[in-house]
Image (spheres, rainbow, N blue to C red):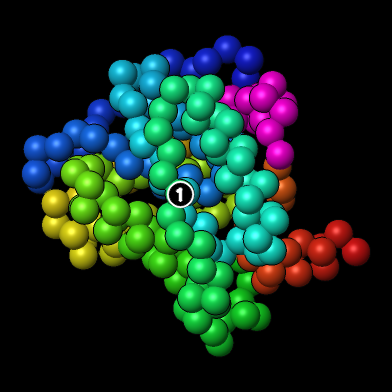
């Protein structure tokens, strides 16, 4: 069921080690970002969106999703940072895991790759808190996302991982509503060629 009325959720930032409350929000796409960004803003938190998604292929698909993130960030009046795109480097971490199913070992390595890059950017640019929109998708394993986030932030002690279930409190329903209201470009596969292959097999 869609949620036309914004849910009222009170957020509490995790305690930061370096004292910086600035939030870097790793974003996989605009649909998954929508309700999270809205909720953060309603709580007086102004995140910077970090688009780091070298898993997405072809590049045209990557750019479509990036443009939707840019559009929503501009509408919300928040900054968006685009990480470098290197699908070949991403493929190197997926090597040997090509046949893994969704929520398998390849997804965990993918999350670690992207969130490590986000944590490094946070460390280098004074952000004390890292979160991700990956945790909003019901197609993803919350346990894998949190494990990857904890790992990434362990490499940079001044960055704290914000462990948050962004599906609860009506945010999943609000996300579905915003996808339609904003007419976001939306896909049911995460972006890599392996997830697309699995999605195509399901639809056959």
Q: Is residue 193 left or right of residue 158?
A: right
The single residue placed furthest to the bottom in the displayed view is: 96
- Tell me, yes or no, if residue 11 can be seen here: yes
**Residue 175 part of the magenta segment:** yes
Eyeballing the image, is 194 above or below 47? below
From the image, which quarter does the C terminus lie in?
bottom right
How far across and down, in percent of the image, does residue 26 sit?
A: 42, 47
From the image, which quarter does the N terminus lie in?
top right
Question: Who's the residue at 71% across and 39% down the image?
Answer: 185
Q: Is residue 184 left or right of residue 73?
A: right
Question: Who's the residue at 67% across and 71% down the image?
Answer: 194
Q: Which residues are magenta?
A: 170-185
The single residue placed furthest to the right in the displayed view is: 204
**Mark 1, other Cα within 10 Å: few <14 / some 14–19 / many ≥20:** few
List the residue tagged with mark 1.
82
The single residue placed furthest to the left in the displayed view is: 18
User: In terms of image quadrants, where is residue 70?
Assistant: top right
**Residue 31 part of the magenta segment:** no
Eyeballing the image, is 201 above or below 122? below
Question: Who's the residue at 49% across and 18% down the image?
Answer: 7
Question: Who's the residue at 14% across and 41% down the image?
Answer: 16
How far across and down, in percent of the image, does residue 46 sit?
A: 33, 26
How far across and down, in percent of the image, does residue 9 sit?
A: 39, 21
The foreground one among 23 and 198 is 23
Question: At numbered mark 1, what does the secondary structure look like: helix, strand or loop?
Answer: strand
The foreground one among 133 and 24 is 24
How far across and down, in percent of the image, does residue 72 sit?
A: 55, 29
- Tell me, yes or no, if residue 2 can be seen here: no
Q: Is residue 156 left or right of residue 137?
A: left
Q: Majority secondary structure of the magenta segment?
A: helix
Eyeballing the image, is 80 above or below 173? below
Q: Is residue 143 left or right of residue 97?
A: left
């Amino acid at each position: 069921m869609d949620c036309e009325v914004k849910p009222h959720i009170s957020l509490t930032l995790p305690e930061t080690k370096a004292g910086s409350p600035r939030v870097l929000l790793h974003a996989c796409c605009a649909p998954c970002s929508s309700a999270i960004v809205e909720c953060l803003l309603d709580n007086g938190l102004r995140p910077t969106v970090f688009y780091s998604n070298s898993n997405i292929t072809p590049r045209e698909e990557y750019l479509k999703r990036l443009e939707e993130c840019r559009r929503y960030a501009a509408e919300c009046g928040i900054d968006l940072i685009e990480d470098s795109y290197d699908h070949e480097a991403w493929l190197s971490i997926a090597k040997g895991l090509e046949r893994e199913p969704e929520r398998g070992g390849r997804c965990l390595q993918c999350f670690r790759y992207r969130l490590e890059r986000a944590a490094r950017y946070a460390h280098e640019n004074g952000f004390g808190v890292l979160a991700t929109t990956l945790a909003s998708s019901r197609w993803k394993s919350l346990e894998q996302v949190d494990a990857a986030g904890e790992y990434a932030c362990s490499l940079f002690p001044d960055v704290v991982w914000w462990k948050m279930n962004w599906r609860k409190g009506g945010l999943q329903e609000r996300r579905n509503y915003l996808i339609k209201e904003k007419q976001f470009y939306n896909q049911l596969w995460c972006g890599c060629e392996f997830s697309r292959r699995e999605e195509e097999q399901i639809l056959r």
